[in-house]
């Protein structure tokens, strides 16, 4: 890889373009490597930079929503991609939706015209030995994936996602749901799991709807080419079978599997339910819980409908839906720092979906931080760790410090933020208070660190 650049950025997607722009506008000479159109992924269709492959929405633009708060933070930090998105904006209520072609054309033209950025249309198959940011995304080419796996150790690079939905605690009906741990009913400890008890009638109805629900058709690039290899890498086929596939094998399959009631008694009347859905705590703040064993491939609308048949989840708010798709990502905790640096090599940064950040806006944000920090490092300064009170700081903290044994990609959500120093009853007020604190903290940080 012959280049005179100070910094190499691999991947001209949302994260890579933001990172390249941030570094170049601070005076670095950047070589941005993008393999398309010479070599494409299974999902991209154009040769433009920053092609968005699915939804054309960057999510909410309202500060009382996690993605909206993140956007407000990105504006304070002068995000390039967000400005391009605003210039390609379509009417979409409170969300930031874009004309995808105008958007990626704008990014491609502007980045091509900024002094200091050289766009190199070439696949990268080795980790560069000079300062670099890897932002090759969820569909990183196999050659580069191998190189990353060799660097990190094969067990630290995942290729498929099979994830269970996450719901907000505040949306669970606690008059029906109870705390308990299996086989562990001490009077002095209520147990670690939330339990949604089902009668036989409720169970049968739920299973029938689950089996018949609409699923997302797996496209060829989502389905593992080699199931045995995928199973080895992520336990995808054995431990992570979609719950609806398991349910379709036998009406009682789930009552002996993820919904088994053994060892669980309802503390309200001492009865043993016919079946139980357990919810496991997802974050320290206890504001988010995942549906244990419920990795699924139902459409989002069907997850809303079918999972709300479970007693206690009638009004559940889903922070993340279950999903299964091709997704290359690092088991980042312990391997990446909250500065986006690889823990064992200071001048090697990762950004975007490959770090375990989810959502367009989150991926832009991680690229922004990597670009700023690569510039600082190359100028002999300390890379920045953003305060955890900010949404971006909280996301990066999650990526670097989550439980590595159960690491799952995460998008921006209020459950990642540290608690407020006072109780606020109204959910609406609480979200505004989180947002106000985040932006105030960020402004102070920008001033202190002289981020321009
Ligand atoms: C099928 C699919 C649908 C998705 N839908 C959504 C959605 O609706 N909403 C959402 O928020 N997120 C969605 N995502 C996740 C989405 O990919 C990210 O949010 C976002 O695009 C990630 O940004 P990124 O910069 O990390 O990766 P990308 O935007 O994918 O950019 C990575 C770039 O690196 C290039 N590249 C890969 N390997 C190499 C190499 N070896 N050398 C040089 N270049 C390389 C690729 O061509 C690509 O341009 C989806 C992902 C997939 C796979």
Image (tube, helix red, strand yellow):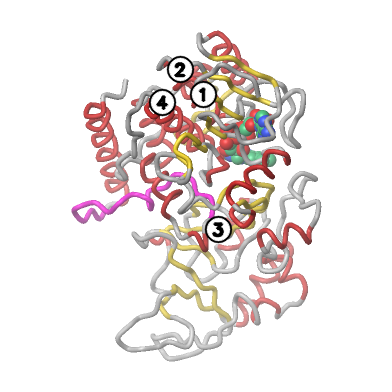
Front residue (pair 368, 185): 368
Question: What residue sits right under mark 1 in the picture?
Answer: 7
Front residue (pair 425, 378): 378
Mark nearer the N terminus (4 vs 1): 1
- Asked if residue 374 is among those painted magenta in the image, a careful observer would answer no
- Element at label 3: loop
Dots 2, 1 in contact, CB < 8 A:
yes
Residues drawn in magenta: 408-425
Q: Identify the residue shown where x is 39% and y is 48%.
A: 397
Dots 2, 4 in contact, CB < 8 A:
yes
Q: Nearer the viewer, mark 3 or mark 4?
A: 4
Q: CA distance from mark 4 to mark 1?
A: 9 Å
Q: CA distance from mark 1 to mark 3?
A: 38 Å
- Element at label 1: strand
Residue 165: which disc?
3
- Ligand 1 falls in which quarter? top right
Q: What quarter of the picture does the N terminus occupy? A: top right
- Element at label 4: helix
Mark nearer the N terminus (3 vs 2): 2
Q: Quadrant of residue 338?
A: top left
Residue 142: which disc?
none
Question: What residue sits right under mark 4 in the picture?
Answer: 378
Mark 4 vs ligand 1: CB below 8 Å: no
Q: CA distance from mark 3 to mark 2?
A: 42 Å
């Amino acid at each position: 890889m012959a280049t005179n650049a100070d910094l190499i950025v691999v991947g001209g997607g949302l994260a890579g373009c933001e990172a390249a722009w941030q570094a170049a506008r601070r005076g670095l000479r950047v070589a941005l490597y993008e393999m398309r159109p010479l070599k494409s992924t299974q999902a991209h269709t154009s040769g433009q930079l920053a092609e968005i492959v699915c939804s054309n929405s960057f999510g909410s633009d309202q500060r009382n929503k996690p993605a909206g708060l993140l956007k407000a933070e990105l504006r304070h930090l002068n995000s390039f991609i967000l400005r391009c998105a605003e210039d390609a904006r379509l009417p979409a209520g409170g969300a930031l939706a874009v004309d995808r072609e105008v958007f990626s054309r704008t990014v491609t033209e502007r980045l091509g015209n900024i002094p200091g950025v050289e766009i190199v249309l070439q696949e990268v198959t080795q980790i560069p030995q000079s300062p670099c940011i890897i932002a090759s995304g969820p569909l990183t080419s196999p050659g580069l994936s191998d190189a990353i796996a060799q660097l990190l150790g094969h067990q630290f690079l995942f290729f498929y996602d099979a994830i269970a939905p996450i719901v907000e605690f505040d949306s669970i009906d606690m008059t029906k749901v109870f705390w308990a741990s299996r086989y562990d009913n001490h009077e002095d400890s209520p147990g670690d799991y939330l339990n949604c008890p089902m009668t036989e009638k409720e169970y049968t109805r739920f299973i029938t709807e689950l089996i018949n629900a609409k699923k997302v058709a797996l496209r060829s690039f989502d389905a593992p080419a080699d199931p045995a290899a995928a199973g080895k890498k992520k336990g995808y086929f054995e431990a992570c079978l979609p719950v609806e596939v398991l349910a379709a094998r036998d009406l009682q399959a789930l009552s002996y599997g993820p919904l088994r009631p053994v060892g669980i008694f309802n503390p309200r009347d001492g009865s043993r339910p016919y079946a139980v859905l357990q919810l496991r705590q997802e974050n320290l703040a206890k504001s988010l819980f995942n549906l244990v064993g419920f990795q699924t491939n139902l459409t989002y609308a069907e997850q809303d409908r079918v999972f709300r048949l479970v007693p206690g989840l009638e009004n559940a708010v889903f922070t993340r839906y279950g999903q299964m798709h091709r997704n290359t990502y690092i088991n980042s905790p312990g391997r990446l720092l909250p500065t986006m640096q690889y823990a064992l090599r200071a001048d090697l940064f990762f950004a975007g979906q490959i770090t375990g950040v989810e959502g367009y806006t989150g991926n832009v944000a991680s690229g922004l931080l990597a670009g700023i920090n690569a510039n600082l490092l190359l100028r002999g300064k300390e890379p920045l760790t953003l305060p955890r009170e900010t949404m971006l700081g909280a996301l990066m903290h999650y990526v670097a410090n989550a439980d590595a044994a159960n690491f799952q990609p995460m998008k921006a959500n209020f459950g990642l933020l540290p608690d407020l120093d006072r109780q606020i009853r109204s959910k609406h007020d609480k979200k505004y208070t989180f947002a106000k604190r985040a932006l105030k903290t960020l402004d102070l940080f920008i001033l202190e660190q002289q981020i321009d």
